[in-house]
C-alpha cells in the first residue's frame, strides 16, 4: 500500500494490512479443524448461527449441527441453515444432564444462557442484562449421537 494511502487511513485512526489468516483467530481455528481432521462441528447455543456462518465464510466444508433452544433465535438459525445441506439446526438445549431448566434471557439474545450472567460480562456488554427466565427442556449432551442427526435428517 502506498505511503500516502496508509497515512490517510492511519490519520483517521485505522490501519489496513494484508490479511493472510495466519495470526487471525478465525485462521487459527480453521487450521486446528484441518489439522485434527474435524469433519463435524457442534455449535451449542447457536443463537442465530453466527458461529456456523463464520465457519462457512472461512471455507469449512464439513458438517455443522447447531443447537438452539430459544424460539425466535432458532427460527432465524433454521432459515440460515435451510439452504446448506451440511448444516443441521436442532431446537434443543444441551447440558450435563436431562432436566427442565431455566434459560437466563438477556436483552441482546446472543448472551442468553443456562449459566448465570457474570459481572464481567455485564460490564463488557451492558445490553446483555438479564430480562427474564424461560423454562426449557435440557438434554444431556452425552445422549446425543451424531448419527441421530444424520445427513438425511433435517431438523429445520
Image: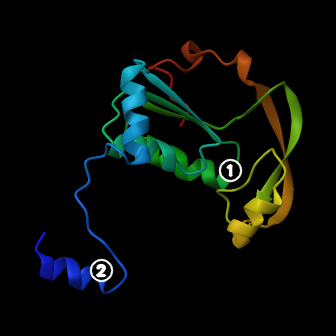
Q: Residues within 10 Å of mark 1 (few under 14, many from 20)?
A: few
Image point (47%, 23%), residue name: 40
Q: Could you tell me which quadrant the N terminus lies in?
A: bottom left
Circle 1 sits on which residue? Answer: 71
Q: Is residue 155 left or right of residue 111?
A: left
Under circle 1, the secondary element is helix
Name the residue beneath numbered marker 2.
Answer: 10
With 146 as the anchor, is 19 left or right in this view?
Answer: left
Q: Is residue 20 something that shows in the picture? A: yes
Is residue 82 positioned above or below 17 on the image?
above
Q: CA distance from mark 2 to mark 1?
A: 44 Å
- Secondary element at image label 2: helix
Give the class, few, some or many, for how many residues have Cα within 10 Å of label 2's Cα (few <14, many ≥20). few
Place of residue 141 in the rendered image (x, y in percent of width and height, measured from the top left): 72, 23
**Front residue of 28 and 136:** 28
Q: Are marks 2 and 1 in contact (CB under 8 Å)?
A: no
Q: Quadrant of residue 15?
A: bottom left
The residue positioned 68% from the left and 68% from the top of the image is 125
Find residue 119 and report its horizontal and vertical position in percent.
82, 61
Which residue occupies 40% across, 18% down? 37
Q: Is residue 130 above or below residue 30?
A: below
Amino acid at each position: 500500500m502506498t505511503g500516502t494511502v496508509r497515512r490517510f487511513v492511519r490519520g483517521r485512526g485505522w490501519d489496513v494490512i494484508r490479511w493472510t489468516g495466519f495470526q487471525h483467530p478465525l485462521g487459527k481455528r480453521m487450521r486446528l479443524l484441518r489439522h485434527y481432521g474435524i469433519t463435524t462441528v457442534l455449535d451449542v447455543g447457536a443463537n442465530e448461527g453466527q458461529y456456523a456462518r463464520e465457519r462457512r465464510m472461512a471455507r469449512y466444508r464439513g458438517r455443522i449441527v447447531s443447537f438452539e433452544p430459544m424460539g425466535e433465535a432458532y427460527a432465524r438459525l433454521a432459515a440460515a441453515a435451510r439452504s446448506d445441506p451440511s448444516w443441521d439446526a436442532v431446537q434443543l438445549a444441551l447440558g450435563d444432564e436431562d432436566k427442565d431448566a431455566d434459560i437466563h434471557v438477556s436483552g441482546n439474545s446472543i448472551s442468553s444462557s443456562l449459566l448465570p450472567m457474570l459481572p464481567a460480562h455485564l460490564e463488557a456488554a451492558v445490553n446483555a442484562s438479564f430480562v427474564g427466565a424461560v423454562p426449557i427442556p435440557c438434554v444431556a449432551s452425552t445422549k446425543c449421537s451424531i448419527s441421530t442427526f444424520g445427513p438425511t435428517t433435517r431438523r429445520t
